[in-house]
Image (cartoon, rainbow, N blue to C red):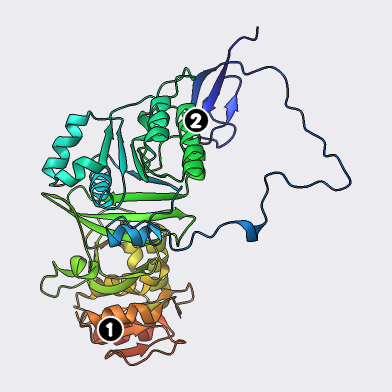
Amino acid sequence: MAKSRTLFICHQCGYEAPQYFGRCPGCQAWNSLVEQVVAPGPAGRPTLAKPTGAAAQPRQALRLGQVAEQLGQRQSTGYPEFDRVLGGGLVPGSLVLVGGDAGIGKSTLLLQTAHRLVEHCAVLYVCAEESAGQVKLRAQRLAVASPECWERLYLLPETNLEAVLMELEALRPAVAVIDSIQALYYPGLTSAPGSVAQVRECTAALMRLAKQSQITLLLVGHITKEGAIAGPKVLEHLVDTVLHFEGDTFASHRLLRSGKNRFGASHELGIFEMTGTGLEEVSDPSTLFLSHREAPAPGVATLVACEGTRPLVVEVQALVSPTSYSTPRRAATGVDYNRLVQILAVLEKHLGVPLSRLDSYVAVAGGLQVGEPAADLGVALAVLASFRNRVVDPQTVVIGEIGLGGQVRPVQQLELRLREAAKLGFRRAIVPPGESIPPLGLEVIPVTKLLPALCAALPDSVEESVAE
């Protein structure tokens, strides 16, 4: 009789090693190998059946034309913001993984979504981390525990994967919520719940059932301290959609981002606001990020960023001050640090601004993360305005990518950005040239170089800095 053996599995990439290593040979991560006892499998190897006859005929494979179309069968979640991130709604038989920090509101979002879904179909909520009574108390606090909800929303406080699969087979709900996938365990494995093998086996078993029974599964996933989904990387490959629920602990808004989507565009963004009765949608996010604008101050510029197909008008703030150390400090909140360093180098090289002897701090108001290059011109304008202690016209928006040669490069979806700015009442826009813009009620100023762009926004300060 075969004996069980011990393997060391990396919880970052799933690499299997017969002995322990301090550093994973697969992904080079330190202290990521976890010991696991593997039970022996059935003896023997599968044999392949040889086709008989002159021409082999397919047994299970289908031609593409024989596959039934599933267009128009998406199930709305009841939240347009959630549907936007999903690409139009839930696809039957799909797996959606929602990850986020502890306490950010993942369970709240899915419980409220389940309440909206029960108006059209039956929903099973597998509460692997809470009891049924705790979920009901939370539902009452969120004002979603209506009598109609009690009849079509089923709760299953269970962590055993086999019991969950049996309940899914018997109930056959249209949508099921698993909260969370790291809390489930498969009795056939000796490792603890949340380990690499447990998460991989539980997700694979749920995926097989979802595809066969056309059950849509919403999985809650924990994240590590680095911000990645906890468990093996294969978890993100098994599911159809990976959503990241983000937000500042000290702010009320929450951002739902799409990192992977097999049925829609990735990098879409949905915005919610946490209130006393749960999450509420923010239909006009630009107004949210601009609602706390104070009197015009030096070092503040307004730009239009795009998250997927959604334009967002946000403020970028900069502070430039003399340094107290031999090496000046650079701090970036909401923008890429390496991008900030590059912009500061371009300003010093082509405009002569002595930023190498000054501390520079840049932040995006509202806690939003802006990672696209179209924000370069707004960052440069805010830094220069802080350096010269000048105020940028609050009715002006700037859009453009800055090249290393000081040129302003074109950006995508320029017309969409300008329409959002015009809707919010802005009067001027400094943009890169090359795209014909229909009349939108904006004074559009096309620029090709960094110096003319900054002269249009800060005519006095730029001339003085160049003269110096």
**Residue at the extreme top:** 1
Q: Residue type at mark 2?
A: Glu
Q: Nearer the viewer, residue 327 or 449?
A: 449
Measured as percent of width and height from the top left, residue 112 is found at 23, 48
Observer able to see residue 188: yes
Density class for disc 2 (Cα within 10 Å; few <14, some 14-19, many ≥20) is: some
Give the residue displayed 25% in from the left and 71% down from the top.
387
Look at label 1 and name its amino acid. Answer: Ala
For numbered disc 2, what is the local secondary structure?
helix
Whole-Å distance between the Cαs marked 2 and 1? Answer: 58 Å
- Choose top left, top right, bottom left or bottom right for residue 353: bottom left
Left or right of 260 on screen, residue 357: left
Q: How many callouts does the rendering have? A: 2
Question: For the residue carrying disc 1, how many other residues have a C-alpha within 10 Å: few (<14), some (14-19), or many (20+)?
Answer: many
Which mark sits nearer the N-terminus, 2 or 1? 2
Residue annotated with mark 1: 457
Residue 149: image quadrant is top left
Q: Secondary structure at mark 1?
A: helix
x, y percent for residue 284: 22, 69
Q: Position of residue 339 (x, y in %)?
A: 41, 62
Q: Give above or below for 354 relative to 198.
A: below
Relative depth, front residue between 169 and 353: 169
- The residue under the point 15% across, 68% down is 291
Please report the residue visible at 22 percent of the width from the left and 28 percent of the height from the top: 131
From the viewer's perspective, tell me whether residue 300 is left or right of residue 209.
Answer: left
The quarter in which the C terminus is drawn is bottom left
Answer with the quarter of the image where residue 428 lies: bottom left
Compared with 278, 378 (above or below) is: below
| Mark number displayed over residue 201 | 2
